[in-house]
Amino acid sequence: RRIRAKAESLGLSFNQCHAPYQMDMKPWLEGERTHILHLLTTAIRLAGILGAKNVVVHPVQCMNYLNSDPEWVKQVNVEFYSALIPAAKAAGVSIAIENMWQRHLWNKSIVSSVCSSPYELKSYVDACNAVAPVFTACLDIGHCLLNGSFQTLVVNFANLAFSNYKVDCLFFRQVLICSYDILQQMRANLKVV
């Protein structure tokens, strides 16, 4: 509370926070839910104390995503995110679902993962909001870069999946080769707040 008060006295605020991550599906499915939920609900509660509007929570990742059943992975994630709803409501924050990437199991190259596709990210946000409307999207541009098709992916995110769709979190931390025009188009089309 002192951190929030100090920030406010300086005219600053916290738009978003990031929860702990490295969310491999195996611990979630094999009994570590209590520990995982404790870490995440604590992060959500602290984000609320800081006055953040959003807390980014990575989806649970199947570390062999390319060979998994996407509907099953989505079902596990909706269950996972649903367990966080009471904490988000109590803290007055939205949970931002982030687009992800992972390393290939054998050759260690960077490959797609949960919510890499704009359509999948939108479908996760929609499915979770059907349970309770406390979810938004976090579009991490650095993750788009890691997937290797930055311009195509960003244009798809901006023009196809998210037209008339609000994205509350937009990370630009690793953008090195992006044109100003594309960023402006994204900002307009994504209704960044």
Image: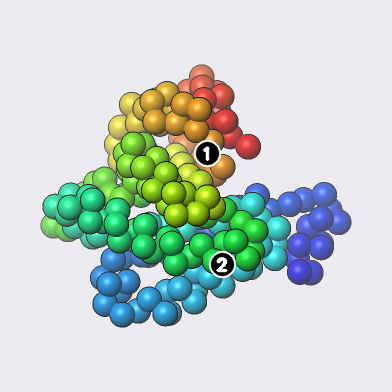
Asked if residue 48 lies left or right of residue 41, the reply is right
Work out how far the residue at label 2 is from the one at label 1, CA to CA, in angstroms: 21 Å
Q: Quadrant of residue 148?
A: top left
- Do tag 2 and tag 1 residues touch (Cβ < 8 Å)? no
| Residue 46 percent location from the top left of the image | 63, 68
Mark 2: which amino acid?
Answer: Ala
What residue do we see at 42% from left, 74% from top? 36
| Residue 65 percent location from the top left of the image | 21, 53
What residue do we see at 36% from left, 36% from top? 118
Specify the label residue 87 is tagged with: 2
Q: Quadrant of the N terminus?
A: bottom right
Residue identified by numbered label 1:
167
| Residue 42 percent location from the top left of the image | 56, 72
- SS class of the residue under badge 2? helix
Color scheme of the displayed model: rainbow
Residue 131 visible in rendering? yes
Q: Residue furthest top?
A: 181
Q: Nearer the viewer, residue 117 or 34?
A: 34
| Residue 101 percent location from the top left of the image | 32, 49
- SS class of the residue under badge 1? loop
Q: Quadrant of residue 121?
A: top left
Asked if residue 48 lies left or right of residue 177, the reply is right
Disc number lying in front (2 or 1): 2
Specify the label residue 12 is tagged with: none
What residue do we see at 39% from left, 48% from top? 127
Mark 1: which amino acid?
Answer: Val
Asked if residue 9 lies left or right of residue 172, the reply is right
Q: Pointer 2: residues within 10 angstroms few (<14), some, or many (20+)? A: many
